[in-house]
Amino acid sequence: MSIGNETEEFEVKSISAEEFVKLDFSKVTLLDLREEAEVLVSGIDGAINIPFSQISRRLDDVPKDLPVYVFCRTGDWSEEVAEILADRGYDVYNLVGGFKAYKEQLANAKPVEINAKGLKCPGPIVKVADAIKELPEGQRVYVEATEDSFASDIAVWCQRTGNHLEKLEVKPGLIRATIEKRKKPDADVAVLPDGKTFVVFSGDLDKTIAAFIMANGAAAMGREVTIFFTFWGLNILRKPKKVKVKKSFIEKMFGFMMPRGTEKLGLSRMNMCGAGAKMIRAVMKSKGVSSLEELIQNAIDHGVRLVACQMSMDIMGIKQEELIDGVELGGVATFLGSGEQSNMSLFI
């Protein structure tokens, strides 16, 4: 490479596709030199896309703080660009064989295996979502599940998240699915919001379980989920142990008469003085269904917003100190704002 009147050769460091797929992409800069249309069809999340035709005037767009891995379609152009970046002091590597070699390496790699057998809804979908989000695009995943509804759920989940369902086998007592992780093309992103909002007005155990199963399923599909608790639904969020807070006589009476926490919730039908709720919990445990407490914690762990209605709290004498961790306070504007960012709102 010529610099002024001097000529200096820079040795371009290279990396094979086999080594490239093992990289932690969050700790490097990926520079994709392919045209935008190619990247829309198949790309790598987080990569900087500067088409080769534009690279000469956009070199300053490439950050220097991390090692830079350059790739084009087959590796020819990227080698030239890697040399230019090395000349400018970058710690740079060229992907031998380019994006084509990377895709071939992923296609030939052994699928990541996920054992979802014995899990009940929404467990299988949540487990798949958690595993696949950490994988590179193009990586294949092999899942086995025993819940019959998983056959329908995984097909819908792949369709809505942009992942590709390569194969689905349904046999008595066993469902096998092979999935290729794909980036959802920008052209397929819905114009309308796709969040989900639930208003939990009821404090019944069965209705609460249903709400959190749906919320966890929506979170597993990558949706923004908000659950707005009002009136009797606030009891779901109360800590199981009494919290010493200053209350009026009426507020104390409300607190005494209402259930404190999820373990005290009754059924909407056949509660039988609490026996029905205990029976339902026992059946859920025997069938491998997550308990309500586990569903709530799973929702919190996956970013589901739990919002307590401030107005209802004031009426019913419930103080913020009495609520479980992870709950935020909100009013009607909070609910309406969430609803406007959702394409589905359910009142439970």
Image (cartoon, rainbow, N blue to C red):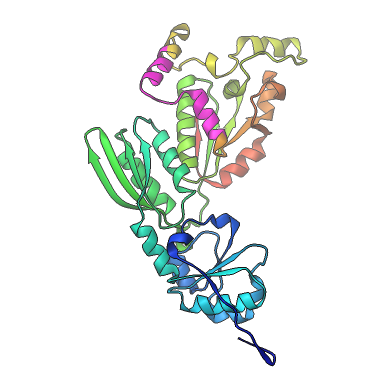
Q: Which residue sits furthest top?
A: 273
Q: What type of secondary structure mainly makes up the magenta span?
A: helix
In the picture, measured across the screen, residue 5 lies left or right of residue 198, that is right
Measured from the top left, where is residue 201 in percent x and y?
A: 55, 26
In the image, 116 versus 88, the foreground residue is: 88
Numbered marks: total: 0
Measured from the top left, where is residue 307 in percent x and y?
A: 62, 33
Q: Is residue 308 above or below residue 156?
A: above
- Residue 224 appears in view: yes
Measured from the top left, where is residue 347 in percent x and y?
A: 51, 32
Res. 62 image quadrant = bottom right
Q: Is residue 230 above or below residue 54?
A: above
Residue at the location (56% across, 35% down)? 301
Residue 13 included in the magenta stretch of the image: no
In the image, 105 versus 303, the foreground residue is: 105
Q: Is residue 49 above or below residue 173?
A: below
Residue at the location (71% across, 25% down)? 320
In the image, 280 versus 16, the foreground residue is: 16
In the picture, measured across the screen, residue 129 lies left or right of residue 62, that is left
User: Which quarter of the figure is the N terminus placed in?
Assistant: bottom right
Residue 282 included in the magenta stretch of the image: yes
- Residue 122 appears in view: no
Res. 203 image quadrant = top right
Measured from the top left, where is residue 290 in percent x and y?
A: 44, 26
Q: Which residue sits furthest left?
A: 172
| Segment colored magenta | 279-300
In the image, 66 versus 11, the foreground residue is: 11
Q: Is residue 86 above or below residue 278?
A: below
